[in-house]
Image (cartoon, rainbow, N blue to C red):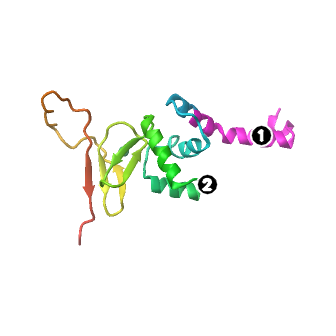
């Protein structure tokens, strides 16, 4: 028997809402596991960031995306949420040009290209381009190695 055909119209709406909110439920689980309460803003931005393929965003670029998706939230809210996600270990912050931070949904340590003209951060495929890492100072150990290779367009 076709279950959808047998449901009155109101239940069909509920069914659609439940199916569409499967992403919301997955996102709420991710947030909960990271120790964050799934507020409306966290869920909305989390669905945009945490469920798809890995990517790099800035607060501004995510804000633009949220506006385009008709989400009503401020740039400050986007920034705060990105910082909360970062503190909870869901994102990794990468400072490329000293002013602006990128947020990487891939929290593993990996090298990047920064395209200065486009103001875009992309993963550097193939791992670290160095065969030797410097020794740490006495009494210290290397915590992690951040590599950002800055690229600019060739002048023709
Ligand atoms: Zn990355």
Q: Is residue 107 left or right of residue 63?
A: left
Above or below, comparing residue 99 to residue 130 in the picture: below
Q: Secondary structure at mark 1?
A: helix
**Residue behind label 1 places its C-beta within 8 angstroms of ligand 1:** no
Looking at the rendered structure, which numbered label has been put on residue 30? Answer: none
Q: Is residue 19 magenta?
A: yes
- Give the residue at x 33% y 49%: 95
**Is 121 placed left or right of 130 in the picture?**
right
- Where is mark 2, residue-wise? 72
Circle 2: is it few (<14), some (14-19), or many (20+) Cα within 10 Å? few
Q: Which residue is mark 1?
A: 14
Of the numbered discs 2 and 1, the one sitting upstream in the chain is 1
Residue at the (60%, 55%) spot, across then down: 69
Quarter of the picture containing the N terminus is top right
Give the overall secondary structure of the magenta segment.
helix
Q: Horizontal placement of 86 versus 69: left or right?
A: left
Q: Quadrant of residue 126?
A: top left
- Highlighted range, magenta: 1-28
Q: Residue 143, position in %: x, y?
A: 25, 32
- Disc 1 crowd rating (10 Å Cα; few below 14, some 14-19, many 20+) is few
Q: Quadrant of ligand 1?
A: top left
What's the CA distance linking mark 2 and mark 1? Answer: 24 Å
Q: Relative to 138, say whether 9 is above or below.
A: below
Kindly give the residue lying farthest to the bottom in the view shown.
Answer: 156
Which percent across, then down, holds residue 98? Answer: 30, 53
């Amino acid at each position: 028997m076709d279950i959808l055909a047998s449901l009155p119209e109101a239940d069909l709406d509920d069914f659609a809402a439940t199916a569409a909110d499967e992403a919301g439920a997955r996102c709420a689980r991710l947030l909960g596991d990271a120790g964050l309460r799934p507020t409306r803003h966290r869920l909305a931005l989390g669905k945009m960031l945490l469920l798809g393929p890995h990517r790099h965003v800035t607060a501004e670029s995510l804000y633009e995306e949220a506006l385009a998706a008709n989400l009503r939230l401020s740039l400050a809210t986007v920034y705060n949420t990105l910082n909360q996600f970062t503190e909870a270990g869901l994102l990794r912050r990468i400072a490329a040009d000293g002013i602006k931070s990128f947020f990487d949904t891939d929290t593993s340590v990996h090298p990047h290209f920064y395209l200065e003209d486009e103001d875009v951060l992309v993963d550097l495929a193939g791992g670290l381009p160095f065969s030797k890492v410097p020794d740490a100072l006495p009494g210290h150990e290397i915590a992690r190695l951040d590599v950002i290779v800055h690229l600019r367009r060739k002048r023709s």
